[in-house]
Amino acid sequence: MRFPVTRDPGNFSEVIDLDLRDVDYIETHPSGYVVFHVKDEVFYPVVPKLSVLEMHLEELGFLRLDRTNLSNIGKIRHFDEERSLVFFSDNATKSSKFSTVSSRMKKILRDRLAGKKGKT
């Protein structure tokens, strides 16, 4: 089994896919962090916070559209500016998956989507 880790407890460094068979032991550090020990190195599990994921997934095309979601810009099929929603299917229905877009992110998203169309 593999586990995403970084070399720092704040998860600011590169994400490494750690093979758990290589781990000597796992402990809880006095600061409360879980620490994986491998030989003379230590690794920290990627904490599933949106802010941590945002930092690491930006290069894959994810953008924080509001405080509650990261959306893959390449998967957006429709932007309903009036309702501040993006949809991930060509024909949006009541059961379609969607993400919300904050007022602050509308222009950024519009520009990003326009750039995406220009590349296709």
Image (cartoon, helix red, strand yellow):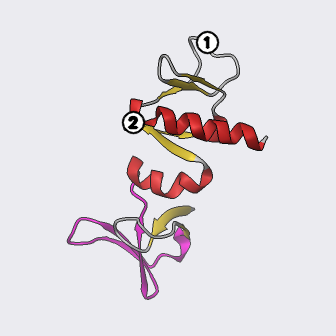
Give me the residue at 40% from left, 65% from top.
11
Residue in view at x 39 percent, y 51 percent? 51
Residue 117 highlighted magenta (yes or no) = no
In the depicted structure, whether residue 17 falls above or below residue 48: below
Query: Tag on residue 49?
Result: none
Q: Return the residue found at the far right.
A: 120
Residue density around tag 1, few if under 14, some if 14–19, many if 20 or more, within 10 Å: few
Disc on the earlier residue, 2 or 1: 2
Q: Is residue 29 magenta?
A: yes
Percent position of residue 114, x then y: 65, 36
Q: Quadrant of the N terminus?
A: bottom right
Q: Nearer the viewer, residue 115 or 96?
A: 115
Q: Position of residue 28 (x, y in %)?
A: 28, 68
For label 2, the SS is loop
Cα separation between marks 2 and 1:
22 Å
Locate the C terminus by quadrant.
top right
Q: Is residue 78 above or below residue 59?
A: above
**Residue 27 placement (x, y as % from top left):** 32, 71
- Magenta stretch in the rendered image: 19-47
- Percent across and percent down for residue 63 are 51, 44
Mark 1 falls on what kind of element?
loop
Q: Where 82 falls versus 45 (above or below)?
A: above
What kind of residue is marked 1?
Answer: Thr
Label 2 CA crowd tier, 10 Å (few <14, some 14–19, many 20+): few
Left or right side of 50 for 14: right
Residue at (42% x, 63% y) in the render: 45
Which amino acid type corresponds to the residue marked 2 in the rendered image? Thr
The residue where tag 2 is placed is 68
Task: Choose between 112 and 57: the one closer to the eye.
Answer: 112
Q: Which residue is mark 1?
A: 93
